[in-house]
């Protein structure tokens, strides 16, 4: 089952992260923006990155995109269920 709305949200997250990473920000502001776009999927990456001492930016971006796809899929499925229940009555 492919969700077009979920795919749209995942691509929007990916493009937003890429556009943030292509800009030059003072200090770590760019990382903060990526963290906020992919929140809460970025939390595990933050903790694992601190433990490993590694930059897990690509992991955070992928996890955020998967998260937004799942959110879109859930919203699309809920709307379909509501429409089908309303149509039965």
Image (cartoon, rainbow, N blue to C red):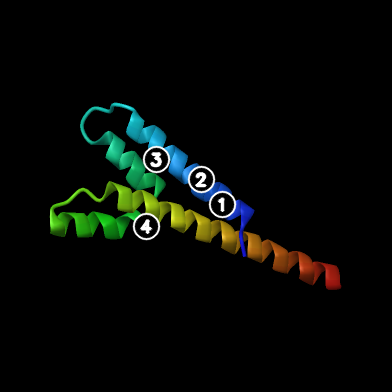
Sequence-wise, which precedes: disc 3 or disc 4?
3
Distance between mark 1 and mark 2 Cα atoms? 6 Å
Sequence-wise, which precedes: disc 1 or disc 3?
1
In the picture, measured across the screen, residue 71 lies left or right of residue 38, that is right
Distance between mark 1 and mark 4 Cα atoms? 17 Å
In the picture, measured across the screen, residue 52 lies left or right of residue 43, that is left
- Quadrant of residue 18 in the image? top left
Residue pointed to by mark 3: 17
Distance between mark 3 and mark 4 Cα atoms? 13 Å
Residue pointed to by mark 2: 11
Q: Quadrant of the C terminus?
A: bottom right
The reply to whether the C-beta atoms of the residues labelled 1 and 2 are less than 8 Å apart is yes
In the picture, measured across the screen, residue 87 lies left or right of residue 12, that is right
Indicate the position of residue 68 as horizontal and vertical percent values: 49, 54
Sequence-wise, which precedes: disc 2 or disc 4?
2
Residue ranking furthest to the front? 1
Res. 41 mark = 4
Sequence-wise, which precedes: disc 3 or disc 2?
2
Under circle 2, the secondary element is helix
Using the rendered image of the protein, determine whether residue 39 is visible from the camera's viewpoint: no
Residue ranking furthest to the right? 89
Indicate the position of residue 10 as horizontal and vertical percent values: 50, 50
Nearest the viewer among 52 and 80 is 52
How many residues crowd around disc 1 within 10 Å: few (fewer than 14), some, or many (20 or more)? some
Under circle 1, the secondary element is helix
Task: Look at 31% across and 48% down and name the residue there.
Answer: 58
């Amino acid at each position: 089952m492919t969700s077009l709305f979920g795919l749209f949200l995942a691509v929007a997250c990916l493009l937003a992260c890429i556009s943030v990473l292509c800009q030059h920000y003072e200090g770590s502001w760019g990382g903060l923006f990526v963290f906020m776009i992919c929140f809460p999927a970025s939390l595990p990456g933050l903790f694992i990155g601190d433990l490993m001492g590694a930059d897990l930016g690509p992991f955070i971006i992928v996890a955020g995109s998967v998260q937004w796809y799942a959110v879109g899929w859930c919203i699309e499925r809920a709307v379909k269920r509501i429409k089908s229940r309303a149509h039965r009555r």
